[in-house]
Image (cartoon, coloured by chain):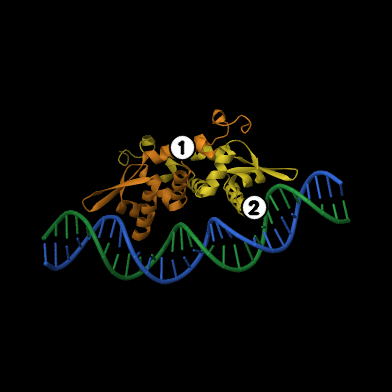
Chain colours: A orange, B yellow, C blue, D green
Amino acid sequence: MAATVFPDLDRASTWFHALSDPTRVEIVVLLSHGERCVCELQDALRAAQSRLSFHLGVLKDAGVVTDRREGRWVYYALNRNALDGIADFARAVKPGKHAGSCQAACCA
Amino acid sequence: MAATVFPDLDRASTWFHALSDPTRVEIVVLLSHGERCVCELQDALRAAQSRLSFHLGVLKDAGVVTDRREGRWVYYALNRNALDGIADFARAVKPGKHAGSCQAACCA
DNA sequence: GACATATATCAACCGTTTTTGATATATAGA
DNA sequence: TCTATATATCAAAAACGGTTGATATATGTC
């Protein structure tokens, strides 16, 4: 059963979808230095404001980033839980890592 | 500089794109039990043959899986390097993990 | 209140991805 | 060689995702 290997496939594919665009991966890398407001990201990426806002929305909906308003500015930050979940997924599906959790016949 | 955090952004977003579809994540989970031929995956996923073949092609092009022919059958298997790369990415961008690799001013 | 700045939302457009059904290729066995 | 099975490829349609420019909302300052 798939579920025994990694319990939350939909959430996983949502994370991966959020990271499937190079611009969004760049945003994540920028945020890995610490939280940033939209205008800082805009300068760093030289991206149109609505375009950046769109990508931040995708990342936020997927739970990869969080946002917080401070005065006029909105600061975005990485969500550690999502990053841990991604690493967990990669670890969980690595062949041989779950030999105990399914029938002996199916796992090499 | 983005490159200091994770050196191969394009490869990362290619991996993530390959995993951005729920069907493909399911395939990966099935393959985590060991290599499988296309017809076994077809039974497990109840997916049309050409559809499955398409998704396997995407995973293969991204380097997430490998294939090998044995007689009439083609067996697909996970590529550990890609899974390691994904886990590495998640670890590398986790805030605080790369404090030494960039200017003190930028990292909290 | 009027104005400026930061960010989000919307609609239109365009290109890409996915699905489907049909056909092609490869291998094996009779 | 003929037939059956496994898989890949192709073309057309449908669905989706990203970009752009315009407009809306929220906040702060004068």
Quadrant for the N terminus of chain B, please: top left
Which disc, if any, is residue A87? 1
Query: Where in the figure is residue B87, as x and y percent of width and height?
Result: 48, 37
Q: Quadrant of the C terminus of chain B?
A: top left
- For this rendering, which residue is in front, D11 or A39? D11
Secondary structure under badge 2? helix
Q: Residues within 10 Å of mark 1 (few under 14, many from 20)?
A: many
Where is A38 relative to D12, above or below?
Answer: above
Residue A42, can we see it?
yes
Q: Nearer the viewer, residue B10 or B75?
A: B75
How many residues crowd mark 2 within 10 Å: few (<14), some (14–19), many (20+)? few
Instruction: Report the residue marked by disc 2.
Output: B49
Residue extending furthest top?
A: A100
Residue B97 picture location, percent across and down: 38, 35
**Which residue shows up at 56% across the image and 32% down it?**
A102
The tally of labels here is 2
What chain is tagged by disc 1?
A: A
Residue type at mark 1? Answer: Ala
